[in-house]
Image: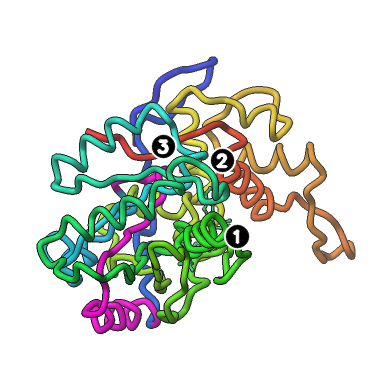
């Protein structure tokens, strides 16, 4: 039994445990294929831009990228922490310093929903600089850069490409964006995002580590929408969200869900919220058609609220 501490007269968990670890294994065929395609295309690439979700600055990184793509040694590499509008701004400096120590000097924080935000604005300049500074750069006349965009699912790779196109070319969307992970299914052709210098970006399918060894890491990835919700279970993700909010003393969910007080019990929360808000579903029983609290859709609303920033800007990883 996890340790509990009394807050607001309610016992709150100090650690999270989940029964079925097997649920957090997700590595569909197209992802494995994507990594192989990336390796094949790497030869003609001048720079790799790795996109992450700033809410999970550590958990989001995939060790396979570095291992199989040889990022540290083969190509100039920029690490983009995206969705910064949803992450805790107080963690930014720590994340920068953490990665500097890991030998990743270029960390850029972006909000790709805003093509004119400072991070997005700086990318082409930083890509050009990184390529020119690299040992492999020998084409003094060359001003055409080929950049591969990589990252785990749903971190905003396509949004980054679209934001850069909008910013530098005034063009609207070139590549599909979606709230669900796994939208990009194959390595796409090059997309021009800037005229001077000529910068071409390649979108790639999201790649996630084939085995998430740490359950809590898997739950953070799920909460950040990099794993399809149903693979983990909306109720489990919602329970982890509740645990994290309570741990932070963040009780904004009480008002949002129309509850009376904070709680640490996800079933109580989901049932009360469903009843209060009339989030019901029809069921057939021996008395005919009836209604009951819709637990899964209530859990989904709770999770969606977190992803939209309703409970504030939250970073889920502790940066050492
Ligand atoms: N709040 C916020 N949302 C973002 C940002 N960038 C992208 N999104 C949203 O995140 C979701 C995923 O964006 P995509 O650009 O499709 O992500 P992707 O990495 O290409 O996704 P896959 O194709 O699944 O690998 C979409 O709902 C975007 O609108 C950002 O900076 N801030």
Residue drawn at x 68%, y 54% as measured from the top left: 297
Q: Mark 2 points at which residue?
A: 266
Helix, strand or loop for disc 3: loop
Q: What stretch is highlighted in magenta?
A: 30-58
Residue located 21% across and 79% down the image: 43
161 vs 255, left or right, is left
Residue at the front extreme? Answer: 141
Tell me if 121 is positioned left or right of 132 in this view.
right
Q: In this view, does 41 lie above or below 130?
A: below
Mark with earlier residue (3, 1): 1
Residue that badge 1 annotates: 170
Check disc 3: other Cα within 10 Å, few if <14, some if 14-19, many if 20+: many
User: Which circle's residue, 1 or 2, is located before the other in the chain?
Assistant: 1
The percent position of residue 196, horizontal first and vertical second, equals 42, 62
Q: Give the CA separation, mark 3 to mark 1.
A: 32 Å
| Quarter assignment of residue 213 | bottom left
Q: Is ligand 1 within 8 Å of the beta carbon of the residue shown at mark 1?
A: no
């Amino acid at each position: 039994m996890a340790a509990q501490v009394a807050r607001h007269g309610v016992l709150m968990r100090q650690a999270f445990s989940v029964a079925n670890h097997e649920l957090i294994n997700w590595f569909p065929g197209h992802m494995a294929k994507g990594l192989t395609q990336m390796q094949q295309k790497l030869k003609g690439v001048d720079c790799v831009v790795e996109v992450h979700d700033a809410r999970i600055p550590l958990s989001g990184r995939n060790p396979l990228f570095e291992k199989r793509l040889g990022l540290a040694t083969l190509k100039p590499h920029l690490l983009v922490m995206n969705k910064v509008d949803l992450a805790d701004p107080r963690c930014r400096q720590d994340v920068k310093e953490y990665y500097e120590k890991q030998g990743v000097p270029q960390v850029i924080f972006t909000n790709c929903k805003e093509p004119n935000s400072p991070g997005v604005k700086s990318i082409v300049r930083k890509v050009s600089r990184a390529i020119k500074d690299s040992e492999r750069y020998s084409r003094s006349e060359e001003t055409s850069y080929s950049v591969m965009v990589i990252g785990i699912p749903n971190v905003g790779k396509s949004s980054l490409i679209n934001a850069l196109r909008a910013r530098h070319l005034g063009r609207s969307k070139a590549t599909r964006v979606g709230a669900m992970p796994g939208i990009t299914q194959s390595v796409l052709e090059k997309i021009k995002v800037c005229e001077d210098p000529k910068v071409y970006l390649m979108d790639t399918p999201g790649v996630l580590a084939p085995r998430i060894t740490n359950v809590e890491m898997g739950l953070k990835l799920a909460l950040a929408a990099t794993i399809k919700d149903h693979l983990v279970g909306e109720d489990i993700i919602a329970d982890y969200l509740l645990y994290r909010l309570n741990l932070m003393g963040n009780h904004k969910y009480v008002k949002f869900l129309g509850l009376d007080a904070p709680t640490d019990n996800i079933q109580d929360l989901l049932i009360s919220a469903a009843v209060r808000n009339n989030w019901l579903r029809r069921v057939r029983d021996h008395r005919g058609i009836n209604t009951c609290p819709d637990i899964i859709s209530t859990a989904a609303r709770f999770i969606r609220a977190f992803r939209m920033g309703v409970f504030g800007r939250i970073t889920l990883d502790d940066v050492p």
